[in-house]
Amino acid sequence: MNVMRLPGRLLCLLLLATAAGCARKPASVQVSPKKVLLYGMDRSQRLTARVLDKNGRELEGLRAVWSSSAPDVATVDEGGLVLSKKEGKATITGQAGQATAQVPVEVVDAAAIEVVPSQATLVGPPGTTFSLTAIVKSSKKAPIAIRPSWSSSNEKVVKVGPAGAMTSVGPGTASVTANVGELQGATEVTVLVHDIVRLELRPATALVRVGDSQKFQVAAYGADGVRLDNAMASFRSSNPAVATIDGAGVAAGVGAGTATIRVDLAGRTAEATLIVN
């Protein structure tokens, strides 16, 4: 029988390499993302994990084992998919051998976004502005203090800022969307490029009781005398202790007295009187 003999130096190197390979044990686990925020129930986020040795090299083929500290708040499957169950906080742990990494998870009860108004018409020259309002509501329909992000489906028609302020760019239609996680609320926007020379606020005088409301309508007129109805404008009350008014032009009686309702659009203004008793 022929026996292959290896030189002593080469044999030592092979033994050292084998020993080094056997010694490559999990030393740390790197998880991405570092934290998870989920809005609403049955929302998901996938975690990924890299298992590393003590030299920071990834151990191929070695997977982390996942667990949740509060499965009633958020569960996690063997592939690292986190699923929200109810409002609260949990910690997701990825483990390989003795090495672990933890990811904090927060679940917020956010069920819907209401954008006010649901439809808007921007009338005026390019650069005309109007601010939308987004109300995030829980599964119990209660408003919650969350600030959404905003986007426009067509920035050649209308642009929108981080606080929901729209600016007209050119004629056409677009959707302006408020986003919180996977939740969305939208309004359909029509832009009519038209010079405004005069505004009217109707009714010119209104009387309401405390707790009642009054809807004010804006009529805008161009240089050609054509009336442009349903134009969106910025409303304000001269005395919020007497009456408040929202972005849709609905004034609410707060206390007895008189307030001036003022509207601004494309550099033009109009006023009306609201009497509360």
Image (tube, grey):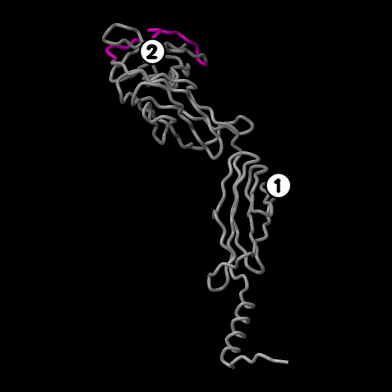
* Residue contact between numbered discs 2 and 1, judged by CB atoms under 8 Å: no
Q: Which of marks 2 and 1 is nearer the N terminus?
A: 1
Q: How far apart are marks 2 and 1 (CA)?
A: 51 Å
User: Residue 217 appears in which quarter of the rendering?
Assistant: top left
What residue sits right under mark 2 in the picture?
Answer: 218
Q: Where is residue 19 in the image (x, y as percent from the top left)?
A: 63, 82
Callout 1 amino acid: Asp
What residue sits right under mark 1 in the picture?
Answer: 72
For the residue labelled by badge 2, is the local secondary structure a helix, a strand or a loop? Answer: strand
The magenta stretch spans residue 83? no
For the residue labelled by badge 1, is the local secondary structure a helix, a strand or a loop? Answer: loop
Q: Where is residue 181 in the image (x, y as percent from the top left)?
A: 54, 40
Q: Left or right of 246: which side holds 40?
A: right
Q: Position of residue 208 (x, y in %)?
A: 48, 10
User: Residue 220 appears in which quarter of the rendering?
Assistant: top left
From which residue to which does the magenta span run?
A: 196-211
Q: Where is residue 62 in the image (x, y as percent from the top left)?
A: 64, 65
Q: Residue 198 bears which disc, if any?
A: none
The residue sitting at 44% across, 18% down in the picture is: 243
